Each structure stands twice: as C-alpha cells, then as structure tokens.
Amino acid sequence: MDLQELVPSFATLKAIATAVALLIAGWLGSKWAYRLAVKALARTHLDQALVRFLASMLRYVVLAATFIASMETVGIHTTSLVAVVASAGLAVGLALQGSLSNFASGVLILFFKHFQLGDKIAIGNHTGVVEDIGLFNTTLVSTDNEKIVIPNASVTNGPIVNYSDRGLLRGAVTVTVEGRLRELGPAIEALVRAGKRAGGVAQEPSPTVFLTDMEDGSLDLTLTAWYRAVEEDGSMHNLRVAVLEELEGAGIKLMNRTQLILHQRSKMPS
C-alpha cells in the first residue's frame, strides 16, 4: 500500500484521538466546574438546592460545548448536527414530556421556594424531611427513615404543607380528670408545670391550658405547647409523660374510657 494512502488514515486516527481526549477533558472539566460553582455560589448565601441546580446546569453546558468541539475535530459539521437534533427534538419532546414537565416543575420549586432542604413537609399522602430537590424529583426521608422520591410535577400539582416554614408547630394533649371547679386550679397548674419541663418543648410561646369541656364530676383540659417540626414525635412523647407525672404528683386522677362511658350513661334519663 502506498504511503500517501496511509496519511489520511493517520490524520483520521489523530482526529479521533483528539476528539476522545476532548471528551475526557470535558467530562473531568464539567466535574471541576460543578465543584467550583458550588463553592462560589455558596458564598452568596443562596439556598443549597438552588446552588446545586445552577451548578448542574453549568456542568451540562460544559459537557455540551465539549461534545460539539469534539464533533468539529473529527470533521462533523455541527450545523448539520444541530439540524438533525432540531428535527428529532419534537419527537423526543413528545416522548419525554413527563420528564420535561418534571424539569419545569423543579425550576419552579427552586425559584418560588415553597420549601427548602431540611424542611418537614407533606406532599399528598407522603410526609418527611426534604433531603434533596433535584431537576426531576424531590426526595423526602420519613420518620421511619424511608426514602421517598416524588416527581416534581406531582409536587407542584397539589397542596404542599410545610411544617417548618413558621419555625414551630403547636401540639395538644387533652386529658379528662375527675373533679369539679375546686380541682380546676390545681389541675391547670399541674399541666402548666408539665409543659414547662417537658424536653423539646419551647418556652416561648409558653405552654397554655384550656378548659375544653366539662361534665358533672369531670373536666376536659387541653394543654397546648410548641416544638420544632422535626422533633414532633419526641417532644409529644416527653409532653405526655410529663403530664402523667405532674397529675399523679398533684393527686389528680384521670378518668379512663370505661369510667367516662359509665359516667355518661348514669346521666342519661331512664
């Protein structure tokens, strides 16, 4: 074979090698650009989810630019490539309309900021702490440590309950105690003490006790207290334990369900 016939082959191999080198460099450069963007945007005090989103977009831009440059290296004109991509864009768009809808919803979530990383939220029948807000999905972690991945379109198409947005939630413990008016004061004092010493319960706003119902010989008292949303289970447990301890220490008896039924029946006309 003539040496001159081999020269184009060497040139082609060189172009291919250069294109591969460009792709590898672009892949590594996109990761470097992502990390650099995260560090730079973190100084602007933007939401972490938005920082990740913008850094991911920069990474994809770098990858796209590298791919176009590598195609030019091997002699593929990008103008014709763009025309092919554009002609296939409609079909791809129709096939991926669900993913595109999730992507658009992800952008809305990040910019409207209905919730942030670390917030406890409820979406439909799912409740958990926000672990990640991605381009297509939002990830929650339930109290049972279950990972819940929800498409972003489902997030924006329904109600979102954010338990963390206001800082504190209010919980209530209702008890029915034996007694009449003269036992009301000691019972309220016992419940207030329980609210003030229960672990995880905020002291401002302070715990409050309400007389929510009353019958002859029984009083319904409701203790309300404030706590952080992510500490709900532990705080409510501590509050209930403190209520039992304080009522017992004050000599105030709770009426159980059987006593309530008998008490109500005794008042019914024969």
Image (tube, rainbow, N blue to C red):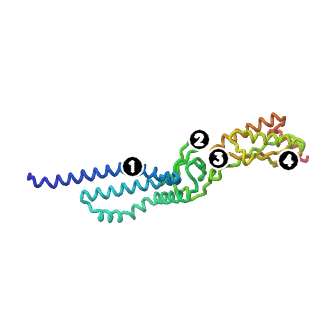
How far apart are labels 3 and 4 at the CA level?
31 Å
Q: Residues within 10 Å of mark 1 (few under 14, many from 20)?
A: few
Location of residue 107 in the rendering, given as x and y in whole percent from the top left corner: 50, 58
Location of residue 167 in the rendering, given as x and y in whole percent from the top left corner: 65, 50
Count how many numbered circles sit on residues in the image.
4
Contact? badges 3 and 4 (CB < 8 Å) = no
Near-viewer residue (3 or 180): 3
Which residue position is annotated with label 2?
Answer: 144
Which residue ends up furthest to the right in the rendered image?
Answer: 270
Q: Which structural element holds mark 4?
A: strand
Which residue position is annotated with label 4?
Answer: 214
Q: Identify the mark nearer the N-term, 2 or 4.
A: 2
From the viewer's perspective, is the residue at label 3 or at label 1 nearer? 1
Q: Amino acid at mark 3?
A: Ala
Q: Identify the mark nearer the N-term, 1 or 4.
A: 1
How far apart are labels 1 and 2 at the CA level?
36 Å
Q: Amino acid at mark 2?
A: Asp
How far apart are labels 2 and 4 at the CA level?
38 Å
How far apart are labels 1 and 4 at the CA level?
68 Å
Which residue position is annotated with label 1?
Answer: 32
Which residue position is annotated with label 3?
Answer: 229
Q: Identify the mark nearer the N-term, 3 or 4.
A: 4
Q: Amino acid at mark 1?
A: Trp
Q: Residues within 10 Å of mark 2 (few under 14, many from 20)?
A: few
